[in-house]
Image (tube, helix red, strand yellow):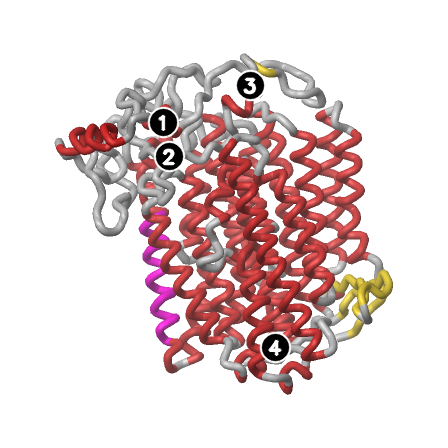
Amino acid sequence: MTEVGDPRPVVAVLVSVVGTVGILAAHRRPNLREAVTLSVAVAKFGVVASMVPGVLAGDVYVWSLGRFVLDVPFELRADALGILFAALASLLWIVTSLYSIGYVRGLEEHGQTRYFAAFAMSLSAAVGVAFASNLVVLFVFYEVLTVATYPLVAHDETMEARAAGRKYLLYTIGGGVAILAGTVLVYRLAGTVAFTPGGIETLAAADPALARAGFALLVAGFGVKAGLMPLHSWLPDAMVAPTPVSGLLHAVAVVKSGVFAVSRVVLDVYGPETVGSLGLGLPLAVVATVTLLAASVIALRKDHLKRRLAYSTVSQLSYIVLGLALLGPNAIRGGLLHIPAHAFMKLALFLCAGIIHVETHTDHISEMAGIGRRMPLTMAAFAVAAAGMAGIPLVAGFVSKFYLLIGAVEAGGASTVFAVALLISGVLNVAYFWPVVYQAFFQAADDHDAKPVVEAPFGGRRASTVARADGGSGDEETDDADDANNADDPDADPDVDPEEVGRPDFGGEAVDRDYGEPAPRVEGEYAVDRHPSDHTVPEKGDADGDHEVDAGADHDDHSDHDGYSHHGGPPPGGWERRGWLGDESTWFMLGPILAATTGAIVLGLVPSAAVFLRLVDTIVEAVGVVG
């Protein structure tokens, strides 16, 4: 491994900072603003990609900006692990930026300049995380990423969005405190916080109790963004954000920065050998296993598509952590390869959810019967990406999960339990993704059976009087129970339809306006308050006790841009059949979906040719766990 002085790591970080300035300057000219966004995204990826050949050849590109605190330099360092994350984030930023253009214009989003500027700053921070050379620099960019993504989480400016933003800040800043404490403890024990392939040698001889405490603090702090239970709660709530933001959170930058940082701690701070000698691998593997199974079970109960995808993300991220915790070469390969595999597949899934929302205002799985007629390309892409998430061959998820399974078996002994957990999780993945595909292609809006949600909270629930498409059952006792509940609540209105409480009004007609100017108000309200971009409806059985949303309830009449009247779900007469050549939406949105899906297939067929597996092999060799 040869260190080479080169400014490209710094340039890769700064290019989108400069782009942010350009985006803000072009706020009165939307076309120019979006041209700047795309140009900067392509330039950023070009800078990162230019370092890939050298890194594969054994070079490490380093550029120092001088001493930061004590003797810790503010230094950026592009090694194989950093390039893996940076190349992934910068490539998928191009895809997400194209999609965002179609999305925000299709919904006439407010605050579009702020949206694109925050996106650019988020990617700058993500690449800073990737190229940080030590824990202190990583902490700085990690916190910048939190601040930059907050406006995106709270973008809708509704009460739900603001609450989700506050929760996001509370969790991530709390995690940041733990990271800072762990960093200080590592510095106290080792005298350095620099990333060293295979781990910092002096940590192996440090006080074991303090070393374990430092590891626990770092993993817990980074585990917030990695979605490890019980630190995951912010992530499903953040689904109130626009769908491209959900893609950023779940596939491109935020949660990936969490698992990336855990990778740094395991591989380059403590090292696999020290983690094993301190007995830290098994507890981390147990936490990851519990998370991946529990989140999959919870996903089964979610009717709102984005929330189901959110809990899927919580589960899938733990595959990566489990691979790292098993400490074997193939397990680590599988865990690291799952970073890009999950990114391509989950981005495709979220972009599909977004285009469904834009075109049909449908967010609930129980309302999607026959939607494959209306959106054939979208739902075909969803099916492919979902197959990959379940580990079906020929898609990226199969390759990474195969390495993980082999790694768990190779570890032997009690680790065989983890192999069984991986197999069970694969079955659960099929269980919560198949109903969406089945609803879309194999059922009709006026003739579908009781699918796809396991909605009953554990321990029982009140039954519903309405025959439901999502797995509920009827019972005459419900009305009496509801009347009794209302009698106890003097403020309760028995005539209020829970549908009206939970779902937004998507009525209104599109109008041309200057997006550089403040959004117009209608009867004293901003449009976003009337038409939230991706309003997250309270789920059935959620702990917050909100009204249950009945999939069988009647909708008020509100016309969307296809000319039929409804809040979501099929119009009267069923879904209109559209062709397979892009009739379902604009190519600004379809193109990125197909690109992300194609990436998942390429990574599943030829992972080495797609570079990511070669980078992973380089990482594994550098940390000394080749087997």
Give the residue at the far left of this rendering.
Answer: 476
Residue behind mark 3: 525
In-image side of 572 versus 111 (left or right): left
Looking at the image, residue 104 lies above or below residue 14? above
> What's the mark number on residue 364?
2
Q: Nearer the viewer, residue 169 or 297?
A: 169
Mark 2: give few (<14), some (14-19) or many (20+) Cα within 10 Å: many
Disc with the residue nearer the chain's start (4 vs 2)? 4
Dot 3: element: strand
Q: Please report contact status of discs 3 and 4: CB closer than 8 Å, yes or no.
A: no
Residue flagged by tag 3: what amino acid is it? Answer: Glu
The picture places residue 309, in percent across and down from the top left corner, at 44, 46
The answer to whether residue 360 of the structure is visible from this angle is yes
Q: Residue at x 69, y 18 (%)?
A: 514
Point out the stretch of residues depicted in magenta.
Answer: 416-432
Cα–Cα span, label 3 and label 2: 26 Å
Q: Which residue type carries mark 1?
A: Gly
